[in-house]
Amino acid sequence: DEPGWNILRLEQRRTEVARIADEKLRPFDAWITPAAAVTAAPVSDLSDVSSALETTMLMGRNSQPGNVFGMCGAVLPIPGPKGRLPVGLQVMCRAGEDAKAVAIARAIEVLIGRADGPDLSGFVSTTGAAE
């Protein structure tokens, strides 16, 4: 358990870092990155807690700066080869610029097209699912 004063100090530092990041990002329209650092893993690969935690941390690594800095964003699937899961493209903007993030994501989608829905049969098991 962390003492309350330590948590308060950490939140004050996070707020300070978010302010600095906001200032540095001011000249840019958006920060665009892959949405995840790795491709999606089959659910069966996440059966033990250790590998599930490691995979989850890798998958969320690219969105963590936006969370810490208080940014807004949109994620869109990028079309890929048939039969493969799409990769995601993340568009992050400064706090309060939600409409801008969505507009940029929509413009990208117009340029590159929409991704088809993937075949999830190799990734998701329906055994035991409610019918």
Image (cartoon, rainbow, N blue to C red):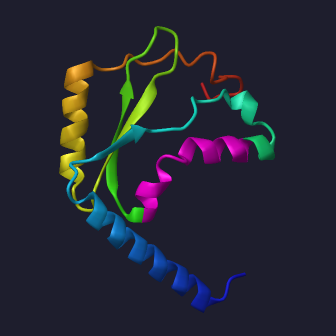
Q: Is residue 116 left or right of residue 111?
A: right
- The residues colored magenta run 52-68
Extreme residue in the top direction: 82
Tell me, yes or no, whether the highlighted magenta stretch contains residue 67: yes
Pick the front one: 62 or 20: 20
Q: Is residue 49 above or below residue 40?
A: below
Q: Is residue 49 left or right of residue 75?
A: right
Residue drawn at x 67%, y 40% as measured from the top left: 55
Extreme residue in the bottom direction: 5
> Residue 42, how many percent across, how many down?
66, 26
Q: Is residue 41 left or right of residue 89?
A: right
Count the marks: 0
Q: Is residue 36 above or below residue 2?
A: above
> Residue 69, how many percent across, how many down?
40, 63
- Which quarter of the rendering shows the C terminus? top right
> Residue 110, how many percent across, how many down?
20, 24
Residue drawn at x 42%, y 32% as measured from the top left: 88
Q: Is residue 36 above or below residue 115?
A: below
